[in-house]
Amino acid sequence: MMDKRLTLIQQIFSELDGVSIEIPFSSDLEFNIVGKIKVQIESMEEYLSFDVKIYPEYPLKRLDNESITFSNTEYLLYGHVMGDGSICRHTSHQIDLKKKVEIDVNSLKRWIWKYYLNKDNDNHYEHLILQPKEFKEKHFSFLFTEVDYVFNKNQFGFFEYSQINNGLYYEKVIFNHVIQEFRDPSSKKVAECKWSSAVKQLPNKNIGIYVFLDNPPARMGKFIINNWADLESLVSKDVFTFLYDVQKSNLKLKGNPIPFLIGYRISDTEIHWEVAILEIGKFPIESYKEDKVWKGGFIDEIITWGITKNCSYDYFFGRGKLSEKITKSKILIIGIGAIGSMVATTFARCGCTSIDVVDHDIKEPENVCRSEYSFLTGICNKPDDLSNELFSISPFIEVGIIDVKMFHVDTKVSQGLTNTTHDLQRRLLHYDIIIDCSTDNDLLYILSKLELNRYITLSITNNAKELVCSVEPSSYNWVMNQYENVLENDLEDNHNPTGCWSPTFKASYNDINTLVQFAIKHINRKMSDNSKSLRNFVLKTNDEDIFSIKLDEF
């Protein structure tokens, strides 16, 4: 079987236009097919040579990677060439072996034309190519954000970081951390990362060291340097003195790792940090005397690079977020049961940074199946539990918990009193958006009488047949009319738990979330378009044949 596949691949390559086999294909000990080809440069007599390696999965992918490589370390200076000389390509799916070889060779020819002949440079920035290494069988990562500070060439000092959850990076343990702030050599704070207050308050802070360079620590413009000796020309002599003093004052921690951040500018407004892991007691530096003066330098030793990620807001939500009319709003969510908790977590994942919540209820185990709570947190107040969930989702969100007793007094107990009503309205005007998911008709009646910036109510009928959303002032009468005269809300077919509890509507997490996400999509679409006004609407489901949702606006 292997011989047949090898013969077929040899034949396919031999029949390709502009391609010749320089070294015949053979099979290695890992059942890969290897060989060497020459590809003619278009309209020229010149040829480029490439080592070819075809993995057993071919023509299918190898996990997320192409299962055929074309490589030559002589082309490292050109764009889209990896450190091992392999050409970086992404081609289309094809299960036919012959057609797949043709597709891949054509993509190689396109690389030759674009990057070898025309020497194109891509407009978007590409990070330096590096391969993370383990320090004593463990990986280390450091997450950072932008800072409101301009670092100078050869500026150095300490930085503070906090450890978050450990995990697995492929088959090795990885220790994950967030960078908190930067300090000068005397430990005075000079800048801090733009995390939420919850992230800034993480305990067990540790200290690392950093230096900021004028140029990236790169070779050939795209590969990170791999030897400490290559860094020597990029830093000032003061850096060696600083490293020497740090190690000398921490010898009691000999053998422990300490992160060394190396920063550099990648645009006029953005900097990036790489991290090398040093071992206390074995810093890659040496001291020597020259003309009766002590000097320092880096030694010839391989750098153990760790992992860094820029987690600034625009990167974190770069793959998609809601309209800024929502994300930049101060939001209050009233009632964080099934609907409210889904709205809150969706907003957190979609870029909102300021959410206050209020609810009088307790989260119990039976709430978990259809809301955004976790079983392992046990029985606790819903606002406390949900705020922790939101903190775990977004490192930029600020969550406030409103005193439910005060809210209840200010709305129901004091309703009708002129001064109190005016004071309540004044305090609620602090919010750009109020989303009422409490399904509390009494509260709806009271808040509908106030002049608020934007008051939205969300509720669903039994079995999640419909979702009702009011977005207009004085919407109490409209909502009540929908439930009492328009919609068929079966109040007999409720879930009745054991014991003296109030019955609740029937619906699964999937039922509720389908409607909630549809509603948020519609609200976001209307709010992002200045030419469209957001109006009251009802979502109606139909699952008699093919499930569908109909939106009716009023």
Image: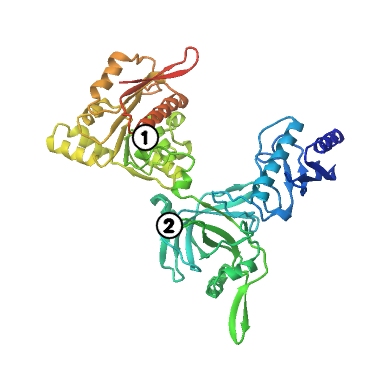
Residue nearest the observer in this picture, 515 or 290 = 290
Determine whether, in the image, residue 122 is placed left or right of residue 26: left
Q: Is residue 33 visible?
A: no
Residue with the mark numbered 1: 528
Q: Amino acid at mark 2?
A: Val
Q: Amino acid at mark 1?
A: Ser
Residue with the mark numbered 2: 147
Colouring mode (rainbow / by chain / secondary structure / one colour): rainbow
Furthest-top residue in this view:
544
Does residue 116 lie above or below 329 as drawn? below
Q: Residue at x 62, y 84 (%)?
A: 290
Does label 1 or label 2 sit earlier along the sequence? 2
Snapshot quadrant of residue 430: top left
C-alpha gap between disc 1 and disc 2: 29 Å
Residue nearest the observer in this picture, 438 or 124 = 124
Can you give x and y, in whole percent of width and height, for residue 524 in the image? 38, 33
